[in-house]
Image (cartoon, rainbow, N blue to C red):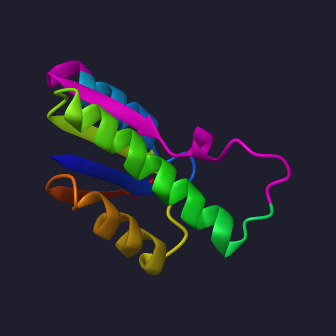
Amino acid sequence: MIVIINGAPGSGKTKTAQFLMEHISPSAIIDGDPMLGINPQNRTEEELDLRQKNITSVAKNYHESGYTTIFVSFVYLGPIYLSKQVDLLKTIDEVKVVALVP
């Protein structure tokens, strides 16, 4: 299962993912922020698509290596971007979405 933890900056996405990972085995975390380590970052549609493809590729690698629960911690800018990420990830495994509100 892949669990997307979405929410505003500072809402506790990464802390929540880390806590859950400590209690669920085997599991892994993907932090969406470093998935677009390019310079310059212009936040174009192409760059946002690249980040989503990178997240999907890493999730696939974890899944193929036997990690049965994968947590994705990231701020999705709107329902269109979140929906696209879900569509990409559900080709790998079941996807659940959790929204954190501070």
Relative to 23, residue 77 above or below: below
Name which residue lies at 37% across and 45% down: 72
Q: Which residues are magenta?
A: 22-41
Splitting the image into 4 quarters, where does residue 35 fall? top right
Splitting the image into 4 quarters, where does residue 46 fall? bottom right
* Coordinates of residue 7 in the picture (x, y in percent): 45, 57
Is residue 72 visible in the rendered structure shown here? yes
Relative to 40, residue 82 above or below: below
* Coordinates of residue 25 in the picture (x, y in percent): 14, 21
Left or right, residue 63 beside residue 15: left
Name which residue lies at 32% across and 53% down: 4
Q: Is residue 57 magenta?
A: no
* Coordinates of residue 55 in the picture (x, y in percent): 45, 48
Relative to 23, residue 32 above or below: below
Front residue of this view, candidates 4 and 9: 4
* Coordinates of residue 68 in the picture (x, y in percent): 14, 34
Is residue 71 visible in the rendered structure shown here? no
Q: Residue furthest right?
A: 40
Name which residue lies at 56% across and 55% down: 51
Front residue of this view, candidates 25 and 53: 53
Splitting the image into 4 quarters, where does residue 96 fall? bottom left
Front residue of this view, candidates 18 and 101: 18
Q: How many marks?
A: 0
Q: Residue furthest bottom?
A: 80
